[in-house]
Amino acid sequence: MKNILEKIIEEKSYDDLGHWCLNNLKYFSEGKNLFEYQQQAIRNITKVLHEYFNVEKSKHHFFKLYKSYGIKDISYSVKKYQNRKDKQLHKINSLFSLFQNHFKINYNNGDEFISGHNFMNRACFWMATGSGKSIVLIKTIELIDYLQSQGLIPKREILLLLPREDLINQFMKEIEEFNIGREKGIQLVNLKQYEEDKQRLAFNSDIKVYYYRSDLLRDERKENILDYRSYENNGNWYVFLDEAHRGVKENSLMQGYVTILSKNGFLFNFSATFTDDIDYATTCYNFNLEKFILAGYGKNLYLSQSIFNFTNDKEDFSERDKQKQVLKSLIIFTFIKKQKKENLYHNPLLITLVNSVQNDNSKNKKDADLLLFFKKLEEIAEGSIKDDLFNETKDELQNELKTYTNYIFGEEKFYFDSNLFKNIKLKDILNAVFNSKTNGKISFLEGEKGKEIVLQLQTSETPFALIKIGDAKKFIKNNLDGKYEMTGSFDSKKYFDNINKNKDINLLLGSRSFYEGWDSNRPNIINMINIGKQDAKKYALQSIGRGIRIEPKTGYRKRLSLNDPDKNILLETLFVFATDKNAVKAIIESIENEKNKEEQEISLFDNLNKPFDLLIPIYADANSRGKIAKFNISCESLKDFKNYIFSFDKNTLLLKTQLSKHDLYYLLDELIKGDIFQIKNENTYRDMEMLLKRLTEHISVKNKVVSGIKEVENEIIHFKNIKVINFSDEEYTSFKRKVINVKDFEMMDKKEIEEKYRNHEISFEEATILYGASKEDSFKDLKIKKIAEHYYLPLIYSEIEKVEYIKHIINVKSEVRFIENLEKYIKNSESSNQWMFSKIDESLDKINIPYFYKKENIYRNFFPDFIFWVKKGFDYKIVFVDPKGTSNADYQNKVDEFEKLFFENNEAKVFKYKNYNITFDLKLIANDVNSVGEKYKNYWLGNNDFSFLEIK
């Protein structure tokens, strides 16, 4: 599977898009900001829209870009006949029948087809369940409205399609949150009211979004079924399709209707599980389950080797074995719960998903899966489990946990305290699972009427489990009436809605009614009982996604670092138990499909030997406006605009522009004086509303200032995202081994290593690693080196500038030459200063120098190639180094802006942080310093000049 669109835009600079960039990219609502990965999704779709709408014949342009990545002319085309047999039988492809009146038909050797270029006006977001797709979707709607108001993309109506009613209701709640406190919110209108709504006068400026159930869009009209042809609107829709594109046969025509509705607009497709090649190819942002977990935002996945078998055939699986299997998940749950500390992480939850809930009514009546699990639960609650069975089960489980330490994704290992595990007793399960100190019979009460059954031991004052099913009344009648005592109801009727807050409910049992549409950080165990192979493929990822989220500390939604004293491996793990080998295989197949075999990631390592605090500046907008750049406009447009704006009174303009009085009067004054305008007759404006908006933004630009100093946290991350492409398993393993060997290199000879081992200072494993480690190594065209002063280890570079099989390393000639010269300096230097440095990757890192780009009157970010930190006592210097030097576009402008930020009266400003006196410097490298203007010569160095690493 190839995510081609993501590659097309990867090297495109978001910061250079100017007016295309959405203001307040991070902000969603009061108290809620987008995570960094969600912001990246918005950056990516902004780059896609810029690439698509900035050229004529956009679809042809995009198809040409896809073909440059290996897509063939015939790719994604829709043929009239799928194969020769169909042609002989005149069996026409249903999608071709649908499309033939909407798209041009092409001919090739007598075959009719609709070219794939017609379907290139689309972008997919492949995002894990629980990653907040709905927030990205809503923010993209905000972006679309913004770009339309700027006149950057065509004006189209927005349509949102979701597959189920509960997802629509969930989305509405997100919209309500988004709208709070906003002057321009989102107004949702049912598509059924489309014609009626078009007749109404609009009295607000809200973003109007029509919505409907995607599965109720057909080519016929019934009570709740809508005929897509009634809403075709010549294909002029921006369509947002959420979780409705899974390749199921009955959905294929719906997808065709969506394609027609958006044929002259754009299709935005959001899902956790794509299946079609075109979805993968047009993915602009991939943050699937694997990436979500590897980035630390989700629990690690542990797939148990134990087999859940709940058939009724005793010869296949004994009652004892069934008890053991249920016991295993309860023992794990108890172990997790006993290790939870107050005010850290979540309250653990065990989920059991079953294939059948109600009994089979056939002659050979079989107990439903839910009832089978329920009976085993009952036996444990009542004390039918003997100590020898419990101990045998615990020993089996302990042996498995010690033997199988790999998670499904990533390099982290599962480990646990076996001594604590050994101390678990049967009474601990009673307390942790059943909220009781003694055994007892199960009683039940009704939660939400007809949907929930709450279980409680008669020896306890609190419930312990919730059964969530479609027909609770039938389950009670068939299985519980007369056998179990029904107790009174509590005040809270809807237990499932409050599952995240309810500490008493430890077990959640049910079927597909809660496979999707809700999120919780509580689950640590998922049992999948008799979910057959086909179902496992379809539901494994959705069900796993229900409990993958994590929040170890309030507001911190990632796994804790390995050296954090509060880290709890158990609470950061989601244990998955499945029914049989086929189900396990299907789950693995589903998860393997998540992995992109063509492109793999490898993470380099933090340098743990940083000798001092590494600091960076914080930027903010100044209170006052700086010097305004000239605004280019034709003489005719300026005349028209003056007539337009002076036709309003000042109070109306204040409301219309949202400017302060001071800024409005400044604009009106400048229109009379004309100082900020530069006449260029090619810059013609017809839309005066848009021109007013552009000018309002133009005069509202504030200077950037340094508002403070902070320590580096997540501003340098590119080394955790090294991408290797088309590596075989052997190449991948070999490359990783060399990276680790160089990282682990220490300046010791073999005798010293042997002595440390003999003195028990290092283990045999550590000694072996040190024996095999080297300070540098090579792989293909790559140099792998350990430079002790670098921010991360090892440093990787290539002297071949266009090395295609790896990304986010050093491969620009000027940077490589700089590193090689720096190595020579290190070898010969006798400096007493402490210093460190890091490569900066423009596409992923967040260390930059803002500078004013006069041509467009906006601030852009200048990303130097390297940052150096130099310390001597309390004197501290931060140096930005860019080896590209005079080849760097707009360098004079960048130097000028650097001085505004970091200089005062021609001297470097001194910034205070802790006890440090901090100054900043910028160094650019030129082969010929004489080619540089006199003012800027202080900023240039020769290739071998590292004097900036000295503090005098």
Image: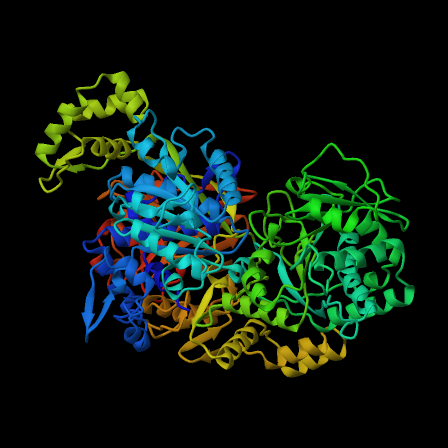
Q: Is residue 186 left or right of residue 522?
A: left
> Which residue is more in the foreground, 549 or 414?
549
> Which residue is more in the foreground, 806 or 194?
194
Residue 186 image-quadrant placement:
top left
* On-image quarter of the N terminus: bottom left
The figure's colour scheme reads rainbow
> Which residue is more in the foreground, 757 or 282?
282
Q: Residue at 47% across / 41% down in the picture?
A: 911
Q: Can residue 41 be seen in this view?
A: yes
Q: Where is residue 473 in the image (x, y as percent from the top left)?
A: 70, 44
> Which residue is more in the foreground, 55 or 282?
282
Q: In this view, does 534 lie to the left or right of 160?
A: right
Q: Where is residue 319 in the image (x, y as percent from the top left)?
A: 82, 67
Residue 693 image-quadrant placement:
top left
Q: Is residue 14 visible?
A: no
Q: Position of residue 232 (x, y in %)?
A: 29, 46
Q: In this view, does 435 lie above or below 548?
A: above
Q: Is residue 345 above or below residue 317?
A: above
Q: Position of residue 699 (x, y in %)?
A: 27, 31
Q: In this view, does 20 lie to the left or right of 440?
A: left
Q: In this view, does 285 lie above or below 322?
A: above
- How many numbered circles are shown? 0
